[in-house]
Image (spheres, grey):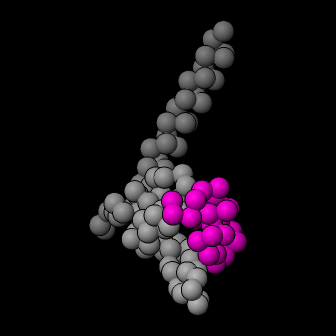
Amino acid sequence: MPRPTADEDVFRAVADPTRRALMETLGRDGEQTVGALAEAVGQSVPLVSRHLAVLRGAGLVDERRAGRHRIYRLNPAPLQDLFDWAALFSGFWTERVLNLRAYLERQKHET
């Protein structure tokens, strides 16, 4: 079975907190104009437009035109690769947390 990979563009896109906020807003509130998104995240329209370009490049948002407005919506499908990749490490962290818990329990009983 091949190991899952996560696209570098998706990693780069979700690394930025403003882009994550844009994705959360679109996921929560549905389709939005760039102006509404700028207001929601407290950023300027030009800055939000640049962030949306990165998200579009990673395939995380879709854009459609409605008259002179551009409407954006979340496309969560590319996040599946990221999720699959991150799942490779869930066992690692589970084991580490269990080891830490056992260590702390031993320390508690020794004192």
Q: Taking 19 as reference, is 42 left or right?
A: right
Question: Does residue 8 show up magenta in the picture?
Answer: no
Question: Does residue 24 show up magenta in the picture?
Answer: yes
Residue 16 vs residue 91, the one in the foreground:
16
Q: Taking 104 as reference, is 3 left or right?
A: left
In the image as oriented, which residue stretches furthest toward the bottom? Answer: 67
Is residue 100 visible in the rendered image? The answer is yes
- Residue drawn at 61 percent across, 16 percent down: 107
Place of residue 74 in the rendered image (x, y in percent of width and height, measured from the top left): 56, 74
| Quarter that holds the N terminus | bottom left
Q: Taking 50 as reference, is 1 left or right?
A: left
Residue 71 vs residue 93, the one in the foreground:
71
Q: Give the range drawn in magenta.
A: 23-47
Place of residue 11 in the rendered image (x, y in percent of width and height, measured from the top left): 40, 57
Number of numbered callouts drawn = 0
Residue 86 vs residue 25, the one in the foreground:
25
**Within the image, what quadrant is residue 78 found in?**
bottom left
| Quarter that holds the C terminus | top right
Is residue 82 visible in the rendered image? The answer is no
Residue 18 vs residue 28, the one in the foreground:
18
- Residue drawn at 53 percent across, 85 percent down: 64
Place of residue 71 in the rendered image (x, y in percent of width and height, measured from the top left): 58, 80
In the image as oriented, which residue stretches furthest toward the top? Answer: 111
Q: Is the magenta stretch mostly helix, strand or loop?
A: helix
* Depicted 14 relative to depicted 58: above or below: above
- Residue drawn at 50 percent across, 79 percent down: 62
- Residue drawn at 48 percent across, 71 percent down: 60
Place of residue 79 in the rendered image (x, y in percent of width and height, measured from the top left): 48, 67
